[in-house]
Image (tube, grey):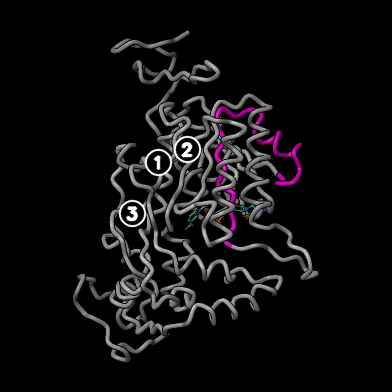
Amino acid sequence: MLIAYKDARVLTTTYLTQRLIHDLMLRRKTGQPFIRQGGGGRSTSNGHIATVFGCTGFLGRYVVHRLAQQGTQVVVPFRDSEEARHLRVTGDLGQIIPLEFDLKNRETINECVRHSDIVYNLVGRDYETNSITLVARNFSFDQVHVDGARAIAEACAENDVARLVQVSSLNANEDSTSAFLRSKAKGEKAVREIIPDTTIVRPGTMYGQEDRFLNRIGTGEGWQFWVNESQAKIRPVYAIDVAQALEVILGAESTMGKTYEFYGPKEYSYQQLFDIAREISKKPLPTYNLPTSVAKLAASVLDKFPYNQMISPDLIERMTLDDKPTPGALTFADLYIEPTDLDAVALQFLRRFRSTAVFDLPYEKGEGQVKKGVYHVID
Ligand SMILES: NC(=O)c1ccc[n+]([C@@H]2O[C@H](COP(=O)([O-])OP(=O)(O)OC[C@H]3O[C@@H](n4cnc5c(N)ncnc54)[C@H](OP(=O)(O)O)[C@@H]3O)[C@@H](O)[C@H]2O)c1
């Protein structure tokens, strides 16, 4: 076996390469060895096979990209093949393996995990999905976050998968007033009962190009953020930072059995976030103080529509809750990652909402405070 010690050189038929001791990795639980070849990017292989459930979502694409870039072969389970198409180009030919699965069908889950040495569960839903009959739910929060997570953990245990990483949510708590957050906490418990050394990751509200957060604020669709006088305080986190942390976790066996909370370096009220969005987009983006009970009533009507994907009473409830990181919990700093400052990158995500007349104006924080009606939207 080509195990390399520091400065040992291995002459291959095509190129001279250097392997170092840290190119060799052993899975603590199974003893499987992995030898890395290449320095990252195309034609790199690190020997790992990862399954990323929930890869078709917002965070998923960044996780798959990060893993593939480091030479990991990535199994991408999907429900709708169109939703997984963009993931194919994140790796070399044959490196990204799409497999159809159903969260309620154990055979398909087994098929997705049986070759992998690490499984990520990113499956989650902000709302409960209605069936066309309006009577039963297709997937309740518990079915997705508890039963689904349990099924994935059981499949990992059956197939001797060395590592499981469960993505939960900041503020997950069995006593929370939000059903979403309660189900996330129950999901954490369910996976730890089956695989005690599961790594649990709790991200805060994530932002990025395809988010459901700054994009809603920028387009003015974010009326749910107006509840609680937009004073709820959150710590938004950059999706790419979370993806980077998930990539680090792949190789860091010391993260087994631990819980990490990933949140941004600054706390903002929704009001402050609207101010940033106004400054950058140069749009008035008016907000109104919506009584929580009225918002919930409106949301519960909208929630009855089968194809509503935006609003639910539980989402309104979450919009009234402050982010409360657990004191002493492990964070980015424990993985030597410095989280991105939202102020530093918000321009990338919010400039697209500017009208063409002001598109090229620079953004300097504090300047150009937008007063209602000063900027006219020319679309
Ligand atoms: N985004 C945030 O701000 C935020 C904050 C805290 C925690 N989280 C958690 O972080 C994880 C990733 O977030 P995200 O924003 O990337 O989520 P997302 O964009 O909503 O994607 C969710 C993923 O889960 C899959 N999924 C949902 N319900 C499913 C079901 N019944 N059966 C099979 N697959 C299902 C989706 O597959 P389809 O494409 O087939 O629907 C998709 O791949 C989730 O667990 C989420 O709860 C997110």
- The residue sitting at 40% across, 33% down in the picture is 40
Q: Is mark 1 within 8 Å of ligand 1?
A: no
Q: In the picture, residue 74 is in which quadrant?
A: top right
- Inspect the image, locate mark 2, and give the three-letter code of the amino acid beneath it: Leu
Q: Secondary structure at mark 1?
A: helix
- Inspect the image, locate mark 3, and give the three-letter code of the amino acid beneath it: Gly
User: What is the crowding at mark 3: few (fewer than 14 residues within 10 Å), some, or many (at least 20)?
Assistant: many
Q: Secondary structure at mark 2?
A: helix
Task: Find disc 1 in the rendering and name its residue.
Answer: 245
Q: Secondary structure at mark 3?
A: loop
- The residue sitting at 53% across, 17% down in the picture is 32
- Viewer-side residue, 96 vs 57: 57
**Front label number (2 vs 3):** 3
User: x and y percent of residue 312 in the render?
Assistant: 59, 70
Task: Find disc 3 in the rendering and name its residue.
Answer: 264
**Front label number (1 vs 3):** 3
User: x and y percent of residue 264 in the render?
Assistant: 33, 54
Look at the picture and state if 324 lies above or below 309: above
Give the residues in magenta.
101-126
Task: Find disc 2 in the rendering and name its residue.
Answer: 67
Query: In whole angstroms, how far apart are the C-alphas of marks 1 and 3?
Result: 13 Å
Ligand 1: which quarter? Answer: bottom right
- The residue sitting at 40% across, 41% down in the picture is 245
350 on left or right of 317: left
Q: Is mark 2 within 8 Å of ligand 1?
A: no
Say whether marks 1 and 2 touch (CB < 8 Å).
Answer: no
